[in-house]
Image (spheres, grey):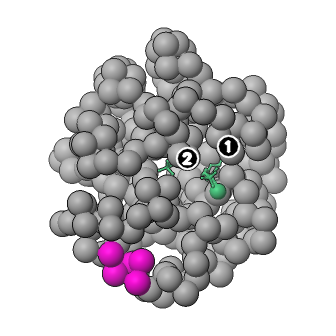
Amino acid sequence: MNIYQNILQAKKKGKKLLAVLIDPEKIDLENIPSFFEKVHQSIATYIFVGGSTDKDNQIEIVVSKIKKVTHLPVLLFPGDVSQITNTADGILFLSLLSGRNPEYLIEQQIKAAPILKNTNLEILPTGYILVDGGKETATQKVSNTKPIPQENKDLIINTSLAGEFSGKKLIYLEAGSGATKVVSQKIIREVSESISIPIIVGGGIRSKQQLVNAFKAGADLVVIGTVFENDENFFNQLKK
Ligand SMILES: CC(C)=CCC/C(C)=C/CC/C(C)=C/CC/C(C)=C/COP(=O)(O)OP(=O)(O)O
Ligand SMILES: O=P(O)(O)OC[C@@H](O)CO
Ligand SMILES: [Mg+2]
């Protein structure tokens, strides 16, 4: 079974999924084995690797090191085309649907196409939607786009629906790395009631309660990054 079929099956069974996001600019290569001992004791089901930037082009070496120590599927979550490496298992083939910058709507995807054609990566077409998370994030700066205000619920729902109708296999509601305000339960609930494809939610989740809230509201997969960078003991709260 491939990664997407696994996500669909989990959704059908109501099994919730957690991705640990690793930023290639921030992870200490030496720390990867001990970090993964904690990952493996937790409920994490996927590893995402990527950043809005990867200035020193660390992604390939980071993913290779990770693949040596884990059997969890590793998915690229790329800020741009330079973050593609065949050493991962799959890629979130993102299109930034909340913005109107052609570079992140289609140009990056065209640049990525000939590279991906020569890899074995499983491609997961993903509608990526930035919602306001209370502060300007790196992704907003890099993409030069504005997030959708959380008050503008209908626009978030309709953008998600347009993503599904254009063939995206996943919708990612993103408050932004280190957000001070998470995507509200109301938004997650209404989007999940409107679309039939799985929903990824991330940005600013720092407590078990926030994770549970996102799952309860209808998130199928939650992404957590920053809190693990700052405090690996958070894994203790997420034991299997
Ligand atoms: C299809 C291909 C190859 C690439 C997609 C390119 C697109 C559309 C990217 C969307 C916009 C973007 C810059 C996304 C980055 C998402 C990401 C990995 C965010 C992680 O957070 P950081 O912004 O690195 O957080 P910190 O500021 O905490 O480091
Ligand atoms: O780093 P945090 O705030 O957990 O966000 C995770 C992810 O959604 C960012 O792209
Ligand atoms: Mg980063």
Cα separation between marks 1 and 2: 8 Å
Left or right: 14 with respect to 132? left
Mark 2 sits on what residue? 177
Compared with residue 98, is residue 117 higher up or lower down, i.e. above or below? below
| Residue 230 disc label | none
- Earlier in the chain: of badge 1 and badge 2, it is 1
Which quadrant of the rendered structure holds the N terminus? bottom left
Question: Are discs 1 and 2 less than 8 Å apart at CB?
Answer: yes
- Residue 125 image position (x, y, % from top left): 56, 46
Write down the quadrant of residue 142 in the picture. Answer: top right
Q: Is mark 2 within 8 Å of ligand 1?
A: yes
Q: Tell me, yes or no, if residue 90 can be seen here.
A: no
Mark 1 sits on what residue? 139
Question: Who's the residue at 55% across and 87% down the image?
Answer: 30
Left or right: 148 with respect to 111? left
Q: Is mark 1 within 8 Å of ligand 1?
A: yes
Q: Amino acid at mark 2?
A: Ser
Q: Tell me, yes or no, if residue 191 can be seen here.
A: yes
Which quadrant of the rendered structure holds the C terminus? bottom left
Compared with residue 213, is residue 68 higher up or lower down, i.e. above or below? below
